[in-house]
Amino acid sequence: MDLNPTAEDRAFRTEVRRWLETNAATGDVKTLDERKAWHRKLYEAGYVGMLWPKEYGGWGRTPMQQAIVQDEMARLGAPPPINGLGIGFIGPTIIVHGTDWQKQRYLKKMLTAEEIWCQLYSEPNAGSDLASLKTRAEDQGDHFLVNGQKIWTSSGPIADWGILLARTDGKAAKHKGISCVLLHMRQPGVEVRPLRQITGSSLFSEVFMTNARAERRDLIGNLNQGWEIAQTTLGWERGANSLGRVTRYAVAFNQLVRATKELRRGGKPLLEDAAVRARLGKAYAELEVQRYAALRVLSALQNSDSPGAASSITKLSYTEFEKRYFELALEILGPYGQLVSAREEFEDIDTSSGEPGTWATAFLWSRAGTIYSGSSEIQKNIIGERVLGLPKEVRADRLKA
Amino acid sequence: MDFSFSSDQQLLKNSARGFLDEHVKPATVRLLWDDPRGESDTLWKEIAQLGWLGLSLPEAHGGSGLGMVETALLLEEMGRAAYPGPYWPTVLAATAIELAGAEAQKKRWLPAVATGDARATIAFLDTELDWRPEAAQTRAEKTGKGWTLSGRKRFVPWAHVADVLLVPAQTPDGLTLFLVDPRAAGLALEPVPVMDLATRLVDVTLDRAPVAADALLGGPGQAGPLLAALLRRGAVGAAAEMLGAARRCLDMAVGYAKVREQFGQPIGSFQAIRHKCAEMLLEAENSHSAVYYAAWALDAKAEDAELAASVAKAYVGDAARKVCGEAIQVHGGIGFTWEYDLHLYFKRAKALESMYGDGDYHREAILRRVAA
């Protein structure tokens, strides 16, 4: 057990910090073109696609080094790269299950964000029970005819391509009739309608597919192998944001402490209120534990013990913490917690969910984490069944099957 | 950067588990609960022979010179077994002697601790039950031959079996630490009736108790920083024990949920139970991260070692109480019976939550560091 960073990682951190201090975009990085330009710069510096093999345009770095880059970006408040789903999950899926043609065609442009990707998985009636999805892809020989509706599609409005799960065999058991295929988003049969979130912005969307065309050469793996592929996809961004996330919490904590020095109750700063102090102390303890846990995950990745189902513990832990954390912040800030545009005394904070904004934005965003990528309830099922070995629940759909 | 245990550390943990499973079964714990002393000399000699008592003491004084990580590994296993005895108070007091003692004091006490011939404890709390070392109210007055100590030390772990008490007292020079013979004149010991009978606590009244001139541990007025350091170390050790108690309760709850059937199914198949168990595992894993980060930080003298100790104690205190309590809930009625073993660990976790600085103390300590 040695939690000191290696000399190599220390040197790497210094190098990253210098690069970011010199290059971190000083002007606006708001429009898609500006964000793509910043992304490209990060990629060329070797800070995007860090865990991708070099032969596919990646940098063959370690999970720790990837985490260091994100941590330094959080420290500096640098804008994040884009195309996260593509680089984190879709690209690795293509690398593991895709054909040579697919790799040649898609990977490099994904890394450089020349083409933006989205994930077409969830449907209005297939959320946690994803395998009950109804979107159909009819085999037409050289292509599939796709009809159906997807929902909660992040980056939908800006996406050029999507990775689609659709039913290709309506007669097979529900997990066995699904295929995975890449879908061009810029075609007449695909309509993207932005959905407005509780934060007021529209980062996700509904996608309607009406006789949309997916090419046969874009089928990933075999026909009807889609569920298996979706289940076995190993994300290559695991642990990437682990340190950066905690650093953003810590930056927010310092801002909160500054606010408690300015806000007053009973003629003295809120920071001197015993009840406030106790709650801040508790929140910071939890925040630090998130940091220790992040180091433990990175260490496991380094020792290549794949965390497997245990990564559900990590996701459950930080998303639930984040809710408690911003609930506390808003309680302490009182009416100021409601501000949706920043004032001088309560500056913008990083919401750690990709959207800059106020405490209110962070508070609202914190509700998303325990729903996306497998809700807390689904994570607890995974932990219960696959980590603790508790018996599977009796489910109506299993009884039928 | 490596958060995993070395093979030696893993070996130590496994052998501790093996020994405690065999020699400190729940039945053994229950026998000692009923024992007036509350501990067994045979067991004490056995753990001395295993090298546990000298584990962290310097090799020059009969120890093995290992660190807090190894000590925490042992303490986690002891918590898991609800081990009854003065292990941690003794080792902590020996650490105080190692850190501040004169050569003669080290020679007198350290080898004796390592061989199992001496037990020791630190009297942190005074009547106000304030964990800040400077809050000590016990007074020491200089006499011709030495000092006399007067005051009341509360909830001193295992004072009734100790061969030496470490007593902080106020002197004109400030807070000073004294080595006191618990059998000396002017001392009255009174056991406190507590729920975890494997962690005995004793009130110690000092009424002009005479101590020799050479009984000072460290210089006069210099005990404050030493006691603060010992309290932090004590807190990390207690957190490790609480983690062990929580692990035991989690294992028992999961085991029970797999076999106990209601409505024709194992109760672990119900999400209400499964989700509870998942939350308990989450708390145990986070506690593991907190305990071993803090233990490593002490060994490595990391700049955040003091913060990490408070984080571990504050976090694991809450987590272990929750995990052990939920284990009772998962068990239902059987978990509430005296015959079932769960309460041994539930009570151990709760007892340690209030020792070496409770949650409030450590949360305030955290905030003082990060919100100056």
Image: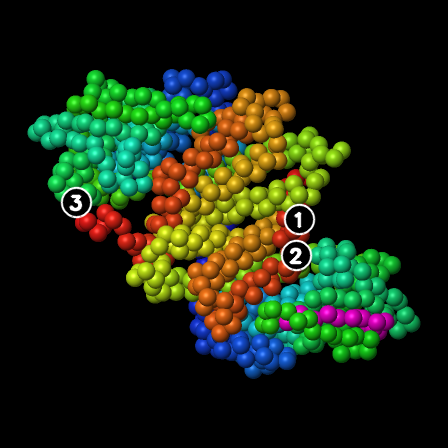
Q: Amino acid at mark 2?
A: Gly
Q: Give the quadrant of residue B239.
A: bottom right
Circle 1/circle 2 CB separation < 8 Å: yes
Q: Position of residue B83 (x, y in %)?
A: 54, 71
Tell which subunit mark 1 falls on.
B
Tag 3: Cα neighbours inside 10 Å, few (<14), some, or many (≥20)? some
Instruction: Say which residue appears at 38% left-offset and 19% top-offset.
Output: A32
**Measured along the vertical axis of the image, is residue A321 above or below residue A41?**
below
Circle 1/circle 3 CB separation < 8 Å: no
Q: Report the quarter where the C terminus of chain B lies.
A: top right
| Residue carrying label 2 | B357
Mark 1 vs mark 3: same chain? Answer: no
Q: Which residues are magenta?
A: B200-215
Viewer-nearest of discs 2 and 3:
3
**Nearest the camera: A156 or B331?**
B331
| Residue carrying label 3 | A173
Tag 2: Cα neighbours inside 10 Å, few (<14), some, or many (≥20)? many
| Residue carrying label 1 | B365
Asked whether residue A28 is drawn in magenta, I would say no
Q: Is residue B5 visible?
A: yes
Residue at the extreme front of the image, as rendered? B263
